[in-house]
Amino acid sequence: MSKEAKFLVYCVERYRHSKSLSGQEVAKLFEKYRVYDYITKYFESLHTTGDICIIQDIDDYIDSVKAVSYTHLTLPT
């Protein structure tokens, strides 16, 4: 298993524990918002931070994706 794959598993487990979610719930959330791609892309930066920073970064990323999705769904005024 690659170091990136091991880190993905680590992030899923830390996120799951932090948010009191099941593995399936985290998997669905990460797939919906492409968090797996994000973690893989920024592996070099993310793997040097601690658990709290990783969780916060994932939350910030998900929020940013939601915000972009929301702005594309609203009607211009």
Image (spheres, grey):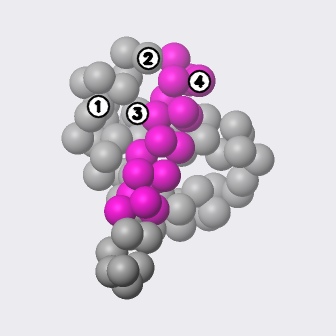
Name the residue carrying label 4: 52
Name the residue carrying label 3: 7
On the question of residue 42 being in view, the answer is: yes
When the figure is inspected, residue 3 is found, relative to residue 25, above or below; the finding is above
Check disc 2 and give the amino acid type.
Thr
How dense is the environment of label 4, judged by Cα within 10 Å: few (below 14), some, or many (20 and up)?
A: few
When the figure is inspected, residue 35 is found, relative to residue 11, above or below; the finding is below
Check disc 1 and give the amino acid type.
Phe
* Foreground label between 1 and 3: 1
> What is the C-alpha distance between the residues marked 1 and 3?
8 Å
Name the residue carrying label 2: 49
Name the residue carrying label 1: 43
* Foreground label between 3 and 4: 4
> What is the C-alpha distance between the residues marked 3 and 2?
12 Å
On the question of residue 2 being in view, the answer is: no
Q: Which one is earlier in the sequence, the residue at label 1 or at label 4?
A: 1
Residues shaded magenta: 50-68
Q: Nearer the viewer, residue 72 or 63?
A: 72
